[in-house]
Image (cartoon, grey):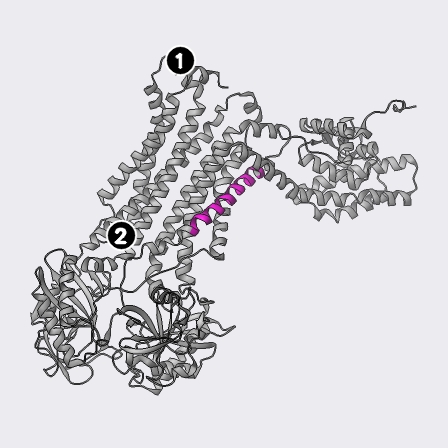
Amino acid sequence: MPKAPSLSFGAAAILHAVASRSRFGFDIMQATGLTSGTVYPTLERLEASGLLKSKWEDAAEAHAAGRPARRYFTLTAAGATALRAALAKYRALRPLPGFAPEQAS
Amino acid sequence: MSLGRRSGASREGDGLRGVLLLLAAFAFLVPRSRRSAWLEQWGAELWHYDQWLTREGAGSAASFLRLLARASGAVPHAITIRLLQWSPHMILNDVKFAWRMFVRRRAFTAVAVLILALGIGANTTIFSWTQTVLLSPLSGVADQGRILVVQSATAERDGLSVSYPNFQDLRAAKPDGIADFVAFRLLPMNLRADSEPIRVFGELVSANFFDFFGVRPVLGRGFRADEGLVADRDAVAVISHDLWVRAFAADPSTVGRCVMLNGRSFTIVGIAPADFHGSVAAVVLDIYVPVTMQKALLSGDRLSQRAGGWLEVYARLADGAAARQVQANIGVAGARLVAQYPDANRSRELRAVPLWRAGASSVLLPVLATLMAMVLVVLLIASANLAGLLLASAAARQREIAVRLAVGASRWQVIRQMLVETLLLSAAGCVGGLVFARWAAGLLDAFVPRTPFPLRFDAHIDAYSIMFAMAISIATTIVAGVMPALRASRLQVGVTLKDASPSTAGQAGRVRRMLVVAQVGLSVVLLVCASLFARSLTHSGSMDPGFSLRNGLLASIDLQPAGYDAARGSVFLQQLLDSVSTIPHVTGATVARTMPLDLGGSSDMTVSIDGYAPRDGEEVMAYYNQVGPAYFETMGIPLVQGRGITRHDVAGQPAVAVINETMARRYWPGRDAVGATMRFGSGPVTIVGIAHDGKYSRLSEAPRNYMYLPALQSYRPDLLLHVRTDADAAGVLPAIRAVVHDLDPNLPLFDVRTIDQHMRLSMFIARMAASMLGVFGALGLLLASVGLYGVIAFNATQRTREIGLRMALGAAQQDVAWLVMRQGLALSAIGLTTGLLLAFGAGQVLAKQLVGVSPGDPISFAGTAIVLLLVASLASAIPARRAARLDPLVALRRD
């Protein structure tokens, strides 16, 4: 296997978001605060380099839920490796003691 | 482009609809295949955002603006999708990855590059030859594509020379689109600088010669315009760089020196550049003299004669002029010359043809076309070979590729990766091929035999050749790389990953075996063709050219520089022939102007035959030779009727001629030609004999009118001594030299060659074709055997465990060896059979070029089969031997 490509912070954040179960564009933007002009192209590149893969949600399922179908992204094995490497590199993505997320009220 | 999946939308604001419409306008940015998905994705994105904005209680105007801002991300997204289809970043990754693969598999890479280098190199070599002969036949001359050859032509013949007055008028007329004309005449001369005279080949040239070709002498000067004005005044010469080095030790004081040319003193005024060899394609010339000095170097007073051509003329196109228009203008200028001088120029017209349609180029081109076709077959073999290697490598990499597909690589990515690898291999092969071709380009000259005049082609690799090499490299990549890449990307991931030993190579293996069969088959075609040409060459050696002289010598003598006039010269020639005839082992001696089949131009003249009325527009002409006494006996040309030329046919006696059968039949049908008269120049010439037809210029020529005129009647100082011997010809040479020395110590013999050497000249092109085909055949065979070796070795490796098991169970070494070898022999046998069938077809195509060999020549076919089987056995024996030497314990442990 070639070694994992090094990721930009934005890409790492997006991988992180996908790994944290934010699986489609809107959710990922909400989770990262990145703009649409960053998130969508980056998703495309990550998929092209084999770190993510995507799948369209079943149309009937979406219909039942009363919304348009979503394109769901998941991490590939290579993506997981890359994310692990990115987490080791970007300390800003690690959990910080005393700053645990607040429970939803 | 429907947004249909949004059917479940509960609320859809006007703002959202507007933004979506706007977005649709940018859809063209997205590659067609991804367009609807892109729209759907953004539809969903904006729907969710719109919902969220509503939940947040944003006003409709604010919502619209924020939706618009969000939607702006769709544009970079679209561009990203498009760029990713050919991202340089990804290609760079592919290149890096390919490099790692090459380093890991050095042997594979080296073999692949070598194969490509051979295939590309051979093609580039032939291309460079063709290109040189076609586009730049003149060494050291710039912009040759803008040079046209101006020839005189009649209704029946073209390629005729031009007279000096016609040339001068043409130049003065300056037809539109012509920058200038130049005239020249190739000519052997005797040059005496210090001691012994040497024979050099040079040209009589119009004074604008060096300017016309854009050639600037490296030392001294070219000719001044005034040196082309007055006949017999300016005895100046420019010599070649080569002659300067050879005869004058590159002494700078050579300029200004006087040398003797044919007994007349000339001043050397300049040294031509080293790469300039004169104006005759492929001929290397040593000295240039103004055409106004004709009388000093060439018989007759030709400068004032308008009838009968003796000069070659080139025209250079003016800037921006189109060749086609200029050709028409030259035709018009020719017609004007006919109108002005109807007697001298009767039924003649002027034509202009590209440089490659004239001279040596036109002779070589058909051969080069055959060679080009054959060398493409070599490239095809190389491509099949490389495809086989790539398939094998893809099979060995199945697991790697399966992993890549499993972790989400697309098929396209895998294909692209493999194509990048092939392209890199081709690039390396292209570089190697160019290195090879750079060396091999010069080989063209190695095939040129010893000729009376020095021939050299100077083929070289130029920008066109490099572009050609690059183009065929890319073509090879496509031919050899696409199929293996497609196959590799079609892997069934689950099966491959589960199966530890990649035995799924079954289908790819079959393709590889087919490729090897194809290579063997194609190389058989090459080998059979090469063999047919070689055998045809041997046969043309034994073909009847109309004369039987085979054992003997030819030597040039020139009496003019030695100071003989016609009377003394005739006496000397008679004495010479008498003395030579008394030498032991000499069975005959004569002189003649030329020996048949010398590849040189032949002389002809217009004849008027008493009692024969030519049809309208018919031109009565005959080629001729001037021959001495006992010519027919010495040459072994049978006389059909009448007598030959004797020692009594001298000046002062009635003019006589012997004609050939073709001429007798044509102009005296059903009548007796002997005793009839014809006229050329002054007075009637009586026909005294009819000789058997023969070949005069080339073995392939059609029957032509031919006349033999007595050399002693119309005296010529430069003649070719023909000596017939009954023993080793070269052994007689010292005695001949002694005889000549006794008669005149100052008279040298030039261009001494045996009849055998002379006969080779007529077959040099056939010889080159046979040799080159032999090289290509060997190259094809080498590639095919490497391919065969590759397949057998690979299969043996795949079967290591099986072989180990067999050995562990008691199989003997030779059983294992046979197991491996059998496969190689089977593949070769199939390839051989196919190849022999194909070769039979190819033979039919080549039948016209073959002399005395049937296209189905059993010796060629059987010989090829034997050679092929031997080589194939060797190629399979090496892996067989290795397999037989396996240690079963190691073999069984292999995964």
Tag 1 or tag 2, which sits nearer the N-term?
Answer: 1
| Chain under callout 2 | B
Tag shown at residue B847:
2
Report which quarter residue B839 is drawn in. top left
- Residue at 54% x, 42% y: name it: B424
Distance Cα–Cα, label 2 vs label 1: 57 Å
Q: Main secondary structure of the magenta part?
A: helix
Could one spot residue B890 in this view of the protein? yes
Report which quarter residue B65 is drawn in. top right
Quick one: quadrant of the N terminus of chain B? top right
Q: Which span of residues is magenta-colored?
A: B416-438
State left or right for residue B814 relative to residue B324: left
| Crowd tier of the residue under label 2, counting other residues whose Cα lies within 10 Å: few below 14, some 14–19, many 20 or above | some
Q: Is residue A91 above or below residue B812?
A: below
Tag shown at residue B808:
1
Instruction: Give the residue type that dot 1 points to.
Output: Ala
* Nearest the eye: B762 or B755: B755
State left or right for residue B636 relative to residue B49: left
Tag shown at residue A90:
none
Q: Position of residue B609 (x, y in %)?
A: 17, 80
Q: Are marks 2 and 1 in contact (CB under 8 Å)?
A: no
Instruction: Give the residue type that dot 2 points to.
Output: Ala
- Residue at 32% x, 48% y: name it: B773
* Nearest the eye: B149 or B76: B149
- Residue at 39% x, 23% y: name it: B883
